[in-house]
Amino acid sequence: MWNAAVILTPVFMSMGGIFSKISVFLYYFFSPVCHQSDARSFHILGYKFAVCSRCMFIYLGFLFAVILYPVKYKLYNIELPSIWLLLIPAVLTGLDVFMDMFGFFSNSFFSRSITGFVIGAVLPFFLIPGFVKMFNEGSLFFKKNY
C-alpha cells in the first residue's frame, strides 16, 4: 500500500476533484520522510511522485526484498546476515549524498535510484528476523506471565 500511495499520488492529482484532495494529503503524509524536491523526483502526468527518486527506490527495493525473502529464508528465521550487507550499501548511499553535497560530482537519477534500491533491498534481511525474534520473545513473555 505504501508503494501504491507513492505512485498513485500524481495520478490522483491529475484526476482533479476529490482525488486531488487525496493527493494533497498524500504529499503532506510523505513530507516528513522525504524532501520531495521537484528536481529530484520522477514525474508522471505532469506531477511528481510523492517522494524523490531515492526514497521511491528505497521503498521499491524494500518491497522487492520482502517478496523474495521467503525464497532465501524461512519466515521464522531469526539469524541476521553479516553487518557488511548493510554497511556497504549505506556507505555507497552516503558517498552519493556527500559527494554531491560537497560538489565533487553531481549525482543523478540513476545513482540516486540505484543506491536507494540497494539499501532498500537489504533492510528486510535485518528487519524481518528482528521482528520475528521480537514477536517470539513477546509471545513467550505473555505465556509465562499470563
Image (spheres, helix red, strand yellow):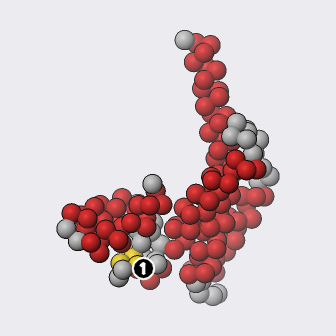
Three-letter amino acid code of the residue under disc 1: His
- 64 or 97: nearer the viewer: 64
Q: Along the horizontal axis of the image, is 39 left or right of 86?
A: left
At horizontal 65% and vertical 60% (from top left) the residue drawn is: 121
Q: Quadrant of the N terminus?
A: bottom left
At horizontal 57% and vertical 18% (from top left) the residue drawn is: 142
Is label 1 in a helix, a strand or a loop? strand
Q: Is residue 132 above or below residue 82?
A: above
Residue 33, given in percent of the width and then of the height, sits at: 45, 61
Q: Along the horizontal axis of the image, is 60 left or right of 16?
A: right
- 96 or 102: nearer the viewer: 96
Q: Is residue 66 above or below residue 133?
A: below
Question: Which residue matches tag 1?
Answer: 43
At horizontal 60% and vertical 26% (from top left) the residue drawn is: 138
Q: Is residue 118 above or below residue 113?
A: above
Residue 117, quarter of the rendered image: bottom right
Residue 129, quarter of the rendered image: top right
